[in-house]
Image (cartoon, rainbow, N blue to C red):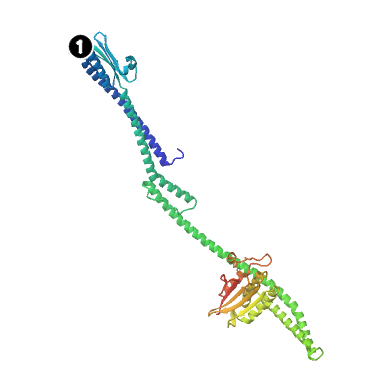
Amino acid sequence: MKNLSLSQRISVYLFLVICISTFILNSAFFVVLRSQSEDEFKVQTDEILSNISRYYQIPIWNLDFNAISEVTDNWLQTRSGVLAINITDEVGGAIIQKTKGNQEFTGLSKQPHTLLRKGKIIHDERQHIGNIEVLFSNAERVEQNNLTYMKSILVSLLFALLVGLVSNHLLTLFVHRPLRNLIEGTQSAHNSNYTIRVPENAPGEIGILAAEFNKTMNQIEDRDRKLHQHNVELEEIIRVRNLELDKQRATMINSSRLASLGEFSAGMSHEINNPLAVIIGKASILRNFVSKGKIPTEFEIHFIKITEMCDRISKIIKNLRNFARDGSNDPFDYFDINRFFSDIGELTRLKLDKKAIVFKFNNSTNVKQIYGKEIPLSQVIINLINNSADAIESLPEKWVELTVDEDEKYVFFRLKDSGNGIPDDIQKKMMTPFFTTKVIGKGTGLGLSISKGIIEEHKGELTYNGESYNTEFIIKLPKV
C-alpha cells in the first residue's frame, strides 16, 4: 500500500468496502433464503404426503399390491425430492417399502438435508387403513441456494472490481494527474525552473489550486527575469569597468616602459652624440686635407661615407628619443606623411634586417599630411611591424608590406606579412589588455589593446582582416 498512489489507495479501499458490505448483505440474504427454503420445503412435503396418501387409499383398501407398487414407483420416479416410501397397515404390518436406487431406507435417512414425514392413510375420510412414511430430500434446493449465493458473491466481486477500476480511472483523471502535475511543477520550482505551468482544467479545488500555482509561477518568473536582467546589467557594468581599469593599467605600464626607454635613449644619445661630433669633426678635417692635396683624393669618398653614417646614427638616436617619448598629451596637428614613414623605417630596419625580413612600402595616394598625434601613431605602426617580425621570423618566406591607400573620407594603412593568418580563438582575445601569445620576457600583451585605444582616440579603427589569406591589420583614419 505504501507504493500506491492516492487514487489507487482510494480505489482499493472502495473495492474492499464494497466487497465486505456485499458479503455481509449476501450472507444475510442467504440466511433468510435458507430459512424460507426450509419452511417452504416443509410445507411442500406436507402437501406431497397428503397427495401420496390419497393415491394409496383404494389400492390398500383393495389390497391391490400391483397398484400399490405402481403408485410407489411412480412417485419415486416423478418426484425428485422423494427418496423412499414405506407403507404399513393400521397395526404396523409391512405392505411395501421402496427407495431410489434400491438403497437402504436407514442409510438414506441419515443423509444430510433429508426429512422423514409420517401420515395415516384414511379411507373415505373415516377408516384408518394404513400408515405411510415418506423420506424427502432437500439437497437439490440447498445446492441451488448455495449456487445462487456463490453467483451473488461472484457478481458482487465483479461489481466491486468494476467500481474500483472505474473509480481508479476517474480519480486518476480528475485527482491523480492534476496532483502529479502540481508535484512536478513544485519539484521543477525547487530546481529554479519557473517556466513550467500546470493545466487548470481540473475540477473543483484542484483546478483553483493549479490556477494559483500558475499565478505564483508567473510572479516568480517575472521577478527572476528582472533579477537576471539586473545581474546581466551589473555584470556588463563590472566588465566595462574592469576593461577600463585594465586599459588604464596597461596605459600606465606602457607609459612607464616608454619613460624608462626615454631615459635610456636620452642617456645613450648624450653618450653617443659626443663621440659622433668628434668623428664628424675629424672627418671634416680629413676632407680639408684632401682638398689641400695632403691626402690622395681617392680617400675622400670614405670620409664622405663616415660623415653620412654619423648623420644616420644621429637621426636614429633622435627618432628613438621621439619614439620613447609619451606623446599622449601632445596636441593634434598635421605632420608630413613621407617623413613619418621614413622615421618609422629607420627605427624598424635594424630588427627586420637582423631577422632577414624583406620590408615593402607602397604609398599609392596623394595624401601629403596626416592629422593626429605623430608619436602615438608611430608607436602603433612600429608595434604592428615588430609583432609581424616576431610572428614570421621562423617561416621560410619572410616579408612585411605596408601599403597606404585612401577613399573620399579615410586614409588606410594596411600592414600585411607572410604569415597565414591568426586562429579564431586568438582573434577573439587579442585586442584585450595583457593578452599575448609570446613567450615570457618577449612580450607584455600591451601592444594591440593600447594601439586600438590610440586609433580610437583619433576617431579611427584598428581591425584585423579575416578575409585575407595572409595576416593583415588595417588602420583607418579620417582625413579631417
The amino acid sitting under disc 1 is Trp
Residue 381: where, in percent of width, then height? 62, 74
Q: Is residue 334 left or right of residue 1?
A: right
Question: Among all residues in the image, which is located at the extreme bottom?
Answer: 292
Residue 394: x and y in percent read 67, 69
Tell me: residue 121, above or below residue 21: above
Residue 323 position within the rendered picture, expressed as x and y whole percent measured from the top left: 66, 76
Label 1: which secondary element: helix
Can residue 327 be seen here? no
Position of residue 65 relative to residue 332, above or below, is: above
- In depth, the one of 401 and 412 nearer the eye is 401
Q: Which residue is mark 1?
A: 61
Q: Choose top left, top right, bottom left or bottom right for residue 437.
A: bottom right
Which quarter of the rendering shows the N terminus? top left
The residue that appears at 40% across and 49% down in the rendered structure is 210
Q: Residue furthest right?
A: 294
- Residue at the limit of the structure toward the front, as seen here: 66
Instruction: Name the residue rendered at 68%, 78% in the picture.
Output: 346
In this view of the protein, which residue sits in the foreground, 399 or 24? 399
Residue 398 quadrant: bottom right
User: Depth check: 43 or 459 in front?
Assistant: 43
Q: Quadrant of the C terminus?
A: bottom right
Q: Is residue 294 above or below residue 58?
A: below
Q: Is residue 96 left or right of residue 348?
A: left
Crowd class of label 1 (few under 14; some 14 to 19; many from 20; radius 10 Å): some
Residue situated in front as seen by the camera: 70 or 211: 70
Asked if residue 275 lies left or right of residue 6, the reply is right
Q: Position of residue 273 (x, y in %)?
A: 74, 79
